[in-house]
Image: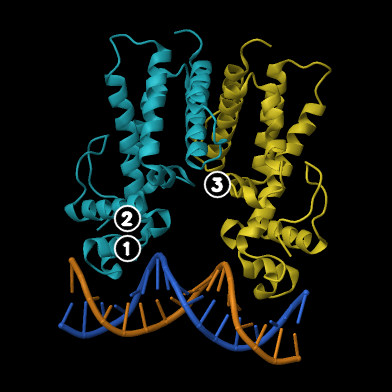
Chain colours: A cyan, B yellow, C blue, D orange
Amino acid sequence: MRATSAREEPDGRSAPSPRLASIAAAALAVLEEEGRDALTMRRVAARLGIRAPSLYKHVDSKDAIEALLIAEALRGIGGAMRAALATLPRRPSRRASLAALARSYRSWALAHPDLYRLATEGELPRERLPAGLEAWSAEPVVRFAAGEDRARATWAFAHGMTILELDGRFPPGADLDAAWAAGVGSLARGRD
Amino acid sequence: MRATSAREEPDGRSAPSPRLASIAAAALAVLEEEGRDALTMRRVAARLGIRAPSLYKHVDSKDAIEALLIAEALRGIGGAMRAALATLPRRPSRRASLAALARSYRSWALAHPDLYRLATEGELPRERLPAGLEAWSAEPVVRFAAGEDRARATWAFAHGMTILELDGRFPPGADLDAAWAAGVGSLARGRD
DNA sequence: GTCTATAGTGGGATAGAC
DNA sequence: GTCTATCCCACTATAGAC
């Protein structure tokens, strides 16, 4: 049984297999409740009431489980950004759209810090992810940034702000709302 | 003997102790030649021709050794940015200055990928770093960005671009020079 | 200041019985 | 599909002799 099995929708809402879904859910619970270092085969198995070796009947490695979580993160971020756009008035400006995307991106990451880190740290295991999911997740930013160079710059800015905040890199009193506004304002400027 | 011992200059060029310096050099060699996972007490000791337990006479933990490397990275980045500014004409524009800073930041990181990752991943062990070094390293950016919010946004952009590039997150053909230019151009705009 | 020896912990993964 | 048993790995860190 492959960890990267069936799903059809770009947003990947479909269920892979009940077994894989429950493994992913258990892994997510371990990650979010016990932290990054606790994400081990033994603990994931324990959540399911089985032993670690049994997991290998469903998944070929720990990497496969991490890939399930990364896919979950991509769906979460993409979904959060789409939801944010849906709350905007009729024809929002580029700047308003980007600001909404930035807010939702940041909020999602702050609500799921370990999952965000897992999904953005190191190389992306693209072979293990549902086809199209990576692009689906990034699509809102691409749509509202002025061109692909701006889109990449905007994504880099958002990721940089987010990971530096999660890692406590900014000074204690720093006004991060203002820094986000400054960045989004700069990057959104141009023909609207 | 404490790992965080003597140094006086803000740029930390002074030697802590010959022993600590040689440990730091050995650790750096392991990191850059063998990669992140190879940075273990055993291997650092092996480079010095001793056994791992002997390291504990000079350093109280592995974290202390990592802190030595992080300090080295901060000195490297700060130094590279200052060197880049020194090559600029008399009174460079803000934009030209920021562009030079960005280029040197990126170049330094690409030349020392594992060291850059080590220094920017997770929380900064501020207690173990020479006082003032963190600020010294960031000072060039603060000086040429328009205000602290812009400075933070610029730093986040630069870090985001850098780490995403190091982790191979951009599409294969992506024109990263253009993305850097787009970001720096946007963030530098304003009163000069 | 170095050594040997070792404690103590944890991890990923496999074999083979049931 | 699950188990037990186990392998093999690697790590940080300490104790105590020299």
Q: Which residue is mark 1?
A: A43
Name the kind of residue labelled 2 in the image: Val
Give the alpha-carbon distance from disc 2 to disc 1, as whole Å: 7 Å
- Image coordinates for residue B186, horizontal then vertical, percent: 57, 17
User: What's the residue at 50%, 28% (across, down)?
Assistant: A176
Q: Residues within 10 Å of mark 3 (few under 14, many from 20)?
A: some
- Image coordinates for residue A111, horizontal then vertical, percent: 35, 39
Give the alpha-carbon distance from disc 2 to disc 3, as whole Å: 22 Å
User: What's the residue at 25%, 65% (across, down)?
Assistant: A57
* Element at label 2: helix
Q: Residues within 10 Å of mark 1 (few under 14, many from 20)?
A: some
Give the alpha-carbon distance from disc 3 to disc 1, as whole Å: 25 Å
Drawn side of residue C11 relative to residue C2, left or right: left
Does the rendering let one see residue B190?
A: yes
Does the rendering let one see residue B34?
A: no
Q: Which residue is mark 3?
A: B121
- Image coordinates for residue B155, horizontal then vertical, percent: 60, 30
Q: Which residue is mark 2?
A: A30
User: What's the residue at 74%, 69% (across, down)?
Assistant: B48
Query: Residue A140's quadrant in the figure?
Result: top left
Point out the image quarter for the N terminus of chain B.
bottom right
| Badge number at residue A16 | none
Query: Residue B45's quadrant in the figure?
Result: bottom right
Drawn side of residue B74 relative to residue A30, left or right: right
Give the chain of mark 2: A
Name the kind of residue labelled 3 in the image: Glu
Q: Which numbered disc flags the more N-terminal residue, 2 or 1?
A: 2
Q: Are marks 2 and 3 on the same chain?
A: no
Give the chain of mark 3: B
* Element at label 3: loop
